[in-house]
Image (cartoon, grey):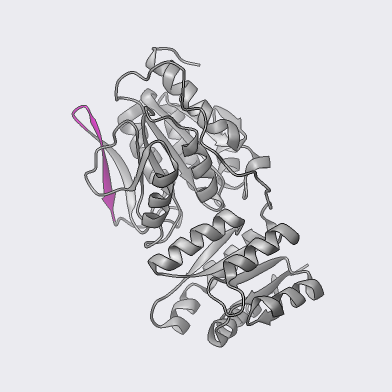
Amino acid sequence: MAIKVLVVDDSALIRSLLSEIVRADAELQLVGVAPDAYVARDLIKQHSPDVITLDVEMPRMDGLTFLDKLMKGRPTPVVMISSLTERGSEATLRALELGAIDFVAKPKLGIAEGMQAYAEEIRAKLKVAARARMLRRAPVVARGAEGGLPLVGTEKLIAIGASTGGTEAIKEVLLGLPADSPGVVITQHMPAGFTRSFAARLDKLCRIQVSEARDGDRILPGTALLAPGGLHMEVVRSGANYIARLSEAPPVNGHRPAVDVMFNSAARCAGRNLIAALLTGMGKDGARGLLAIREAGGYTLAQDEASCVVYGMPREAAELGAAEDVLPLEDIGPALMVQARRRGSGNRV
C-alpha cells in the first residue's frame, strides 16, 4: 500500500514542487496540500496521512506551534521543510525536539531547480519517516555527573555517530556526561549550515563544552567536537594529543560527514583507549567503522531497536558483530562513563 503524504506549505511554488516529487514515486500517494495549519488540520482528519511535510514559517499558525499541537493530539511522522539560514536552522532543531523525524533544507536561490536536485533525498526521507517510531520521551535533564572515580589521563576518547533521530539521541547521551568526561567526537548526518547551531544548542545544555570542529582542533577532556556539515572529520594523533582533521574527500556511504570515516580514523590512533556508540539512523554508515574499533580493542555499543527512531545503522552494527553491547538510549551515556573510568584504572569490562 502506498505511503499517504500530506504537503503543508504557505508557498504555492513549494507545494507544487513537492507534489510533483511525491507523485513521481509509485510508493508515495499525495493525499492533499495545505497552505496553512488550519487547512492541514482538516485534511489530517479526512485522510490520516502516514507522513507530513511541514514548513516552519506559515501564516495564521507557525509550523512549530502546529507541530507541537499535532504531536500532543495526533502524533504523525513529520519531515520539516527548512530554510538554509541561522533562523531556519534554530527552528529546525526546535522542530526535531518537538518530534519531527527529519528535515529537508530549501535552497536559498533557484528553489525549483534545487528542490528537484534533492527529489530522491526527499522521497527517501518521506519513506523512512513514514515507518519511523513515534517515541514519546519525557524532557531530558542532565544527570550522572557527580560521584564516581576521577578520570585519569587524556588518552581516552569517546566517539559517537548518528543519523535520522540522532539530534535528540546525541543530546540525551551528552547530557549524561560529566565535566571531566574524556574528549568526545561526534558525526551526525546534517547539511552545512545546521551543525553550528546544533553544537551551540548542545553547548548551552551540557556540562561539557560542545563546538563545531575546526581543522586542527585538539580533542580535549571535557569537550566535544561535532563534524561540520559537508566535511568529513578524522581523528589523528599528534604527540600526546588527539587532533581533528577536516576534509572535502568524496562522500562515504552517501554521506559527508560520514561516521565510518571518523570511526575508522579513531580506531587507528586510539585503539583500546576508544569508547564508541552508534545511535539511531537509516542506512549502514558507521557499522563497519564500529567493527574496526572493536577489532582494535576499543569498547563498542549500539542503540537498541526499541529506543531508535530508525533502527538502521545500529541494526547493521549488531548484525556484523560490531557492538559489544546493545543498550537503550537512556543507558548509553552512563555506560560510556563506566567504561572510561574502568579503563582509566587499567581494567576491561
Residue 243 painted magenta: yes
149 left or right of 281? left
Total number of numbered discs in the rendering: 0
305 left or right of 180? right
> To which quarter of the image does residue 109 belong?
bottom left
205 left or right of 27? left
> What's the residue at 45%, 54% (across, down)?
189
> To which quarter of the image does residue 209 belong?
top left
Residue 315 painted magenta: no
> What's the residue at 36%, 29% (across, down)?
182
Which image quadrant: the N terminus? bottom right
Q: Is residue 320 or residue 154 the one in the foreground?
A: 154
Name the residue furthest top. 346
Q: Is residue 250 or residue 35 the one in the foreground?
A: 35
Relative to 85, is 274 above or below?
above
Q: Position of residue 256 (x, y in %)?
A: 39, 56
Part of the protein shown in magenta = 238-247
Relative to 342, is 264 above or below?
below
Q: Is residue 143 or residue 330 the one in the foreground?
A: 143
Q: Is residue 156 or residue 84 the one in the foreground?
A: 84
Q: Position of residue 199 (x, y in %)?
A: 39, 50
Q: Position of residue 40 (x, y in %)?
A: 70, 76
| Residue 74 in view (yes/no) | no
Mainly helix, strand or loop, the magenta region?
Answer: strand
Relative to 208, is 89 above or below?
below
| Residue 20 in view (yes/no) | yes
Relative to 34, is 264 above or below?
above
> What's the residue at 31%, 43% (across, down)?
234
> What's the residue at 37%, 33% (across, down)?
267
Name the residue furthest right. 46
